[in-house]
Amino acid sequence: MDSFSYRRTYDGPVKAVLLDWDGTIVDYGSNASVRAITELFRQRGVEVRMPLIRATMGTSHKCQLEAIADLDQVALQWEQIHGCYPTQRDVYTLYRELVPLQTDILSSYGKPIPGALETIKSLRGMGIKIGTTSAYTGELQRRFSAEAGRHGFEPDTSICPENVPSGRPQPWMCLKAAMELQIFPMEALVKIGDTVPDIEEGLNAGMWTVGIAKTGNEVGLTEEDLDQLTPVDRNTRIIKAREKLSRCGAHFVVDSLDEVPQIIELINSRQSETVRHKFI
């Protein structure tokens, strides 16, 4: 068998960013899915605490519901009420029922996070294309895209788990987005999101990754609720979110999307410097 040692190194600029939706572009605190899933299980007589739901955020909704149903405290409540532990058929039924629930609350959480649209405009001014990946079903993705469009956000491509063999943390949504944007190599793209699966998705695709801490799932508060905290409590939550996203491998972690243009400039500098030092 042949062995290989030749390797090309990309020294060009960032050409595209792939953004998550909740907690990154829209829905400050990433509350829409959490509230919908809480209500979904409550309708079946099962109380699921929000931290348990947040721990599963970022994966496809079907995988998320499977993970929640497998939790001991959820499965035991389900068994007490329904006479057996939740089955795959139950999960599938929950999955179908989630769409109308999320649709009902969509308008309440589809508002762009302050500074997000301005940042996206700035990135486009740098010649950067904008794509998105999500955990949504295809139907929810279309509805969320339409709602965001009313606020002025229209990405160049949007990929959901239904478009690929499997969602996060597998890299397929990122790879499909890159293909649709006709951009390569993957070092020319940056994955940006607020959950661990977001970061893992980007890393598995060979991309630069940026974690969003303050406005995302790991802090998990609306802007109004966050402002009501004491400065100490607020900073503690943000630091904890930053540490979690850093531990899972994010190359950079910022508070919100409006810090991303400076990160892009830093990535561009690092890529060119790496190649320059290699040949000195």
Image (cartoon, helix red, strand yellow):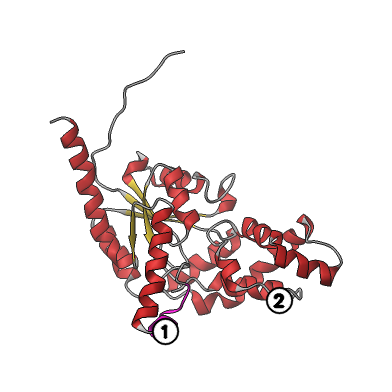
Q: Give the CA distance from mark 1 to mark 2.
A: 26 Å
- On residue 42, the disc is 2
What range is drawn magenta here? Answer: 220-227
Image quarter of residue 62:
bottom right
**Among the two numbered marks 1 and 2 on one chain, the one whose residue lies closer to the N terminus:** 2
Asked if the stretch drawn in magenta spans residue 38, the answer is no
Horizontal relation, residue 42 to residue 107: left or right: right
Give the dominant element type of the magenta stretch: helix, strand or loop: helix
**Residue, disc 1:** 224
x, y percentage for residue 216? 44, 68
Q: Residue at x 31, y 27 (%)?
A: 7
What residue do we see at 50% from left, 76% from top?
A: 109
| SS under mark 1 | helix
In the image as oriented, which residue stretches furthest toward the left? Answer: 280
Q: Position of residue 46 (x, y in %)?
A: 73, 73
Residue 160 to residue 218: above or below = above
The reply to whether residue 214 is in sight is: no
The answer to whether 178 is drawn above or below residue 240 in the figure is above
